[in-house]
Image (tube, rainbow, N blue to C red):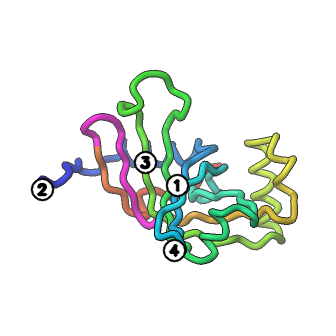
Amino acid sequence: MKPIPFRDLDQRARRLAQDMIASVRYAVLSVYDTAQDYPHLSRIAVQADMDGVPVALLSEIATHTRLLNTTPRAALLIEAEPEAKGDAMAQARMTLQVIARRLPAEGPEHAARLARWLANSPKARAYAELADFHFWRLEPQGGLLNAGFGQNYLLQATDIKNPRP
């Protein structure tokens, strides 16, 4: 089988990956269901944390949250422009391998994260402060950026993080 051709990661591709995370609001989360022996996919709300790492706001009653509590290894599919017109296969997209970790629901970091989340998604106030919703850090371990036809790049964890104001 012929290997997938990857380009050398350059600053433009690294910046695209970081920009995609900085602007993400929704993504597809893939977690593994050991009981069913299949992956489970969910569209979730995601934003970049202060250090450029994806953070999700998840309900404890959701299937994906239950599965993350069992197996924290997951994947996250991010599209550059999820509502863009034209050929979807020509649009930039990125898959990250992540380790999910539930974050504490108190303290100044939590308050700052919640304020930032609500500033970006004001309608989330309806559920963001409910007791069963928690922030989960989706720590990238690596990934694959497809920046368009023939533009495949392997990403390392260090290529992805990018603190934003």
**In the image, what residue occupies the spot 53% across and 64% down?**
31
**In the image, what residue occupies the spot 64% across and 58% down?**
55
**Amino acid identity at mark 2:** Met
**Amino acid identity at mark 4:** Thr
Q: Residues within 10 Å of mark 1 (few under 14, many from 20)?
A: some
- The residue that disc 4 covers is 34
Residue 1 - label = 2
Give the Cα distance between marks 1 and 2. Answer: 36 Å
> Of circles 4 and 2, which is in front?
4
- The residue that disc 1 covers is 162
The answer to whether 79 is drawn above or below residue 1 in the figure is above
Q: Residues within 10 Å of mark 3 (few under 14, many from 20)?
A: many
Label 1 close to label 2 by CB (< 8 Å): no
From the top left corner, tell me how far across and down residue 118 is, in percent: 79, 47
Q: Residues within 10 Å of mark 2 (few under 14, many from 20)?
A: few
- The residue that disc 3 covers is 94
Query: What secondary structure is marked by label 4?
Result: loop
> Of circles 4 and 1, which is in front?
4
From the top left corner, tell me how far across and down residue 73 is, in percent: 50, 71
Which of disc 2 and disc 4 is earlier in sequence?
2
